[in-house]
Amino acid sequence: MKVDTTTLSLLDSKYDGYLEGELVDEFIQDFGIHFAAGHWCAGEFFDRFCPVGYNSNDPSFDDSIVAQIERVSKAGISGIEFHEKVFIDSAYQKDPSFIASVKDALEVNKIVATNMNMNTWTDPKWKYGGVTHPDSKVRMECIQLCLQGVEIAKEVGCVSCNLWPGSDGWDYHFEVDYGKRLSWYIEGCTEIAAKCDQLGLKFGTEPKQKEPREGNMIVNTVAKAALVAKEVNKNLGKTVMGVVIDYGHEQMVGNTPADSLYMLKRVGVPIANFHINGAKFNSNDEDRIAGTDDIWRLVEFCYAAVDTSYDGWFGEDQFTYRTEQVRSMRLSLEFFANCMKKALKIYARKPVLDSAMSTGDAANTIEVVKKIIYNG
Ligand SMILES: [Fe+2]
């Protein structure tokens, strides 16, 4: 991000007041904020209550990847995340002509590919797990799938890869040998991280408390994901693997997102990517429009990103079932920009905040930030 005296001076002039319309785009550009959306945010939404899809009664709705790229562009967003599944056929073979057509669409719409997510859950073969499947043959197939995903990421032009292990975890007590599963997860991530390192890509794993696994997923917290990353990096003899933090997953587990950022920095684990959205404590993953929940938490998260020198992408990971895709993506961008602006205004007063923090009295820190949180 571009955070210096010149850009910070714009906060109380050009960017004073609520940011809307073109001012949002100019703010994102002036501060060098890398903002993306997952391709799925721009497509059809399915859930178990409407498995045919919430747009399936609209014959004009185009769910193709090219149409999704166009919608991301219409929302004024400059980056897009993919799943590797988008680029492979039913036999798990990558399709070079399709990769070429997506690259063309990205160029036409002036959008860059940012992060490649590995899909290891939608095929029933992963029902008992992906990289931690109890059958070693299936485990190896899953790792191979991820390694191919890393290659596709490089071809498409991504800068990072993410393993959100949707099928890895448990639903019941005594279902799995926890230690064995964790070892398999570390072994699988070591292979994927090595491939990412070889191709010059960042790699992270995205923790989530539960869903689709209803006991826990294999990496349920940022701290456990960091532990996995540290073990993987120990295996590789260098720092390669990091964590992908999903803002909504942090709400699900009751974490303070800002705390996770400082914790990762302290233990030397990089952040490979961010997912932003809205969710509540202990809920299933809501993936609602970012910035529609607790503003204090989101502003503090943005402040932590600036203060810990995060320079990667913020990518929308949302499933806005009942609101139109372009409008929903745009609203998330708008709310995020407004919260980031508040964070930057606080950052411009960092010495004052640090001084208030040193007193140990929360009332002193609240006095420093209150007007910015409410009116800034
Ligand atoms: Fe996510």
Image (tube, grey):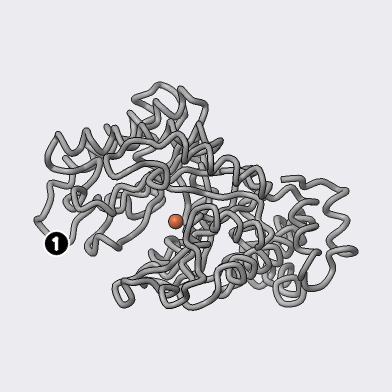
Instruction: Report whether 348 appears left or right of 165.
Output: right
Q: Relative to 205, does residue 39 appear above or below in the rendering?
A: below
Q: Position of residue 324 (x, y in %)?
A: 55, 74
- Residue 231 seen by the camera: no
Of 128 and 349, the residue lying toward us:
128
- In-image side of 40 versus 72 (left or right): left
Amino acid of disc 1: Tyr
Residue 327: % across, % down: 62, 71
Name the residue: 76% across, 74% down.
371
* Total count of labels: 1
Residue most extreme to the front: 59
Residue 338: % across, % down: 71, 67
- Asked whether mark 1 and ligand 1 are closer than 8 Å, the reply comes as no
326 left or right of 137? right
Quadrant occupied by the N terminus: top right
Q: Compare residues 155 and 210 and report the one nearer the observer.
A: 155
Q: Which residue is more in the foreground, 321 or 368?
A: 321
Q: Position of residue 170 (x, y in %)?
A: 19, 56
In which quadrant is the C terminus drawn? Answer: bottom right
Q: Quadrant of residue 11?
A: bottom right
Q: Please, what secondary structure does the residue beneath circle 1 have?
A: loop
Residue occupying image coordinates x 33% and y 30%: 190
Task: Give the residue number, with chain letter if any, for mark 1.
Answer: 172
| Circle 1 Cα neighbour tier, 10 Å, few/some/many (<14 / 14–19 / ≥20) | few
The quarter of the rendering in which ligand 1 is drawn is bottom left
Q: Is residue 47 visible?
A: yes
Question: Which residue is depicted at the point 24% across and 51% down?
Answer: 123
Up-down: is 104 above or below 69? Answer: above
In the picture, residue 359 is in which quadrant? bottom right
- Residue 154 sits above or below residue 91 on the image: above
